[in-house]
């Protein structure tokens, strides 16, 4: 049995490691040159926040300790207002749980190394998919020496939100897709170390919420921070000179200016990326060609679940192969049936979390609500768990998280109503007794 995985990024490399354990002959095809031999593309690093779902997948192939050696735990959000003190908001009620900042490039390199060492796996770079017969498993790749044809028993597209495999499947009528672009773009900036130390608290994900826009910053092992601006589409074009850039950031992000000596250069030269949600139906064709991870269901990054969700896909597909005795024709439809509701749920929650991070985290009402929610969690341990904790610190299916949180909020709302009613009755009784 030969398996071709198109895309040697995070998902494809992890998937190769899992499939190697089944004794399959796996080839990873990547359009880029080997990323381990060159630098990262400017302004495209986008740090990842690895949490329990991603860690669960890494543990299954024994890579969790290696990958986490350079990870930096973040136990909450640090809110940066335009003026006034910083505000730390813990992710968990006990303030002991953390998501982990990790370099996308470093994680990709570790997974590529593991895939290359796995028996039966080979990795081929500078192969860009240009044609695909999804029923026959025949692929055409453009390489530095010309176009080559390859045949595989199973073809898996793990090539990200802009998937070439998905494009071929849409083109031949096997599937349909819909990309819902967010009316926002992103641009990366950087904060270097100061005298060899972090310029900001490395134990937090830093957020500069500004209503219709925001910036976040995640720590790196070299003591720097990677910052990402999320602004409405077109906003970046308004700042075209150093004076305009410095003036704008001095007004809206005043504490960033002394920390970011390369601000102007980063702003003028780093690209603007696009954000969107990918919906695909179905995820597979003919029981032998399928999509996985972002290629099937890319989401916006505001819950830190993109890579975690894709890694969970790999675990789910592996389970489906177990349950179908390795039959791809049965496993691929089963995989989609089990995962679709969950990926739709996290796509919805990621969009909602963008509004929370951008608009709500600096609100006194929001902060009070979070304190009350954590208080309820401590009073009812295990019975009431916040949405953030269920998403980030458990492997509870995303669709179940959404349902459970709705039930919890309904029950909590009913309790509040009952409590208020009791207070009203008590107040009336006291008035009568005077």
Image (tube, helix red, strand yellow):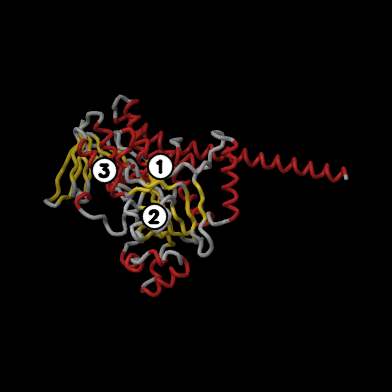
Quick one: 106 or 134, which is closer to the camera? 106
Residue drawn at the location 31% of the way across and 50% of the way down: 162
SS of the residue under disc 2? strand
Which circle marks residue 275 in the picture? 2
Estimate how packed mark 3 is, as few (under 14), some (14 to 19) or many (20 or more) residues with alpha carbons within 10 Å.
some
Relative to 250, 188 lies left or right:
left
Where residue 370 appears, as percent x and y from the top left, is: 56, 47
How many marks the image carries: the answer is 3
Relative to 408, 135 lies left or right:
left
Relative to 48, 113 lies left or right:
left
Depth check, mark 1 against mark 2: the one in front is 1
Quadrant of the image occupied by residue 364: bottom right
Depth check, mark 3 against mark 2: the one in front is 3
Mark 1 touches mark 2? (CB < 8 Å) = no
Toward the left, the furthest residue is 145
Where residue 229 appears, as percent x and y from the top left, is: 41, 60
Where residue 240 appears, as percent x and y from the top left, is: 36, 72
Mark 3 touches mark 1? (CB < 8 Å) = no
Which circle marks residue 51 in the picture? 1
Q: Earlier in the sequence, mark 1 or mark 2?
A: 1
Residue drawn at the location 43% of the way across and 52% of the way down: 205
> Does the image show residue 83?
yes
Which circle marks residue 397 in the picture? none
Q: Quadrant of the C terminus?
A: top right
Q: Earlier in the sequence, mark 3 or mark 2?
A: 3
Residue drawn at the location 43% of the way across and 36% of the way down: 395
Mark 3 touches mark 2? (CB < 8 Å) = no
Label 1, label 2: how many angstroms apart (C-alpha)? Answer: 22 Å
Label 3, label 1: how many angstroms apart (C-alpha)? Answer: 17 Å
Q: Earlier in the sequence, mark 3 or mark 1?
A: 1
> On the image, numbered disc 3 is attached to which residue?
110
């Amino acid at each position: 049995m030969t398996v071709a995985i198109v895309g040697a990024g995070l998902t494809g490399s992890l998937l190769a490691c899992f499939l190697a354990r089944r004794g399959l002959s796996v080839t990873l095809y990547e359009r880029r040159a080997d990323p381990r031999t060159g630098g990262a593309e400017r302004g495209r690093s986008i740090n990842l926040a690895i949490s329990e779902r991603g860690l669960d997948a890494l543990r299954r192939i024994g890579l969790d300790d290696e990958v986490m050696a350079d990870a930096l735990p973040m136990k909450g959000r640090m809110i940066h207002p335009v003026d006034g003190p910083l505000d730390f908001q813990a992710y968990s009620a006990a303030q002991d749980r953390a998501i982990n900042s990790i370099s996308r490039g470093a994680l990709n390199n570790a997974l590529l190394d593991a895939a290359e060492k796995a028996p039966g796996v080979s990795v081929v770079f500078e192969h860009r998919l240009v044609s695909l017969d999804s029923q026959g498993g025949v692929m055409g790749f453009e390489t530095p020496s010309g176009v080559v044809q390859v045949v595989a028993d199973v073809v898996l597209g793990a090539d990200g939100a802009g998937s070439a495999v998905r494009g071929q499947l849409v083109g031949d009528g096997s599937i349909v897709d819909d990309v819902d672009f967010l009316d926002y773009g992103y641009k990366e900036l950087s904060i270097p170390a100061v005298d060899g130390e972090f310029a900001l608290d490395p134990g937090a994900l830093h957020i500069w919420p500004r209503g219709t826009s925001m910036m976040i910053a995640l720590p790196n092992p070299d003591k720097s921070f990677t910052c990402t601006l999320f602004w409405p589409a077109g906003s970046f074009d308004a700042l075209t000179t150093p004076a305009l850039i410095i003036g704008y950031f001095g007004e809206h992000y005043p504490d960033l200016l002394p920390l970011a000596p390369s601000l102007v250069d980063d702003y003028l030269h780093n690209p603007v990326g696009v954000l969107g949600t990918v919906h695909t139906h179905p995820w597979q064709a003919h029981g032998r060609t399928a999509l996985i991870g972002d290629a099937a269901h890319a989401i916006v990054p505001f819950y830190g679940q993109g890579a975690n969700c894709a890694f969970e896909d790999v675990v789910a597909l592996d389970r489906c192969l177990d349950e179908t005795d390795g039959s791809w024709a049965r496993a691929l439809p089963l995989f989609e049936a089990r995962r679709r509701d969950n990926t739709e749920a996290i796509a919805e929650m990621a969009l909602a979390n963008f509004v929370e991070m951008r608009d709500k985290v600096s609100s006194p009402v929001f902060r009070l609500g979070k304190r009350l929610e954590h208080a309820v969690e401590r009073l009812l341990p295990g019975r009431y768990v916040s949405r953030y904790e269920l998403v980030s610190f458990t492997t509870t299916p995303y669709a179940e998280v959404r349902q459970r949180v709705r039930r919890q909020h309904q029950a909590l709302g009913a309790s509040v109503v009952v409590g208020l009613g009791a207070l009203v009755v008590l107040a009336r009784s006291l008035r009568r007794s005077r």
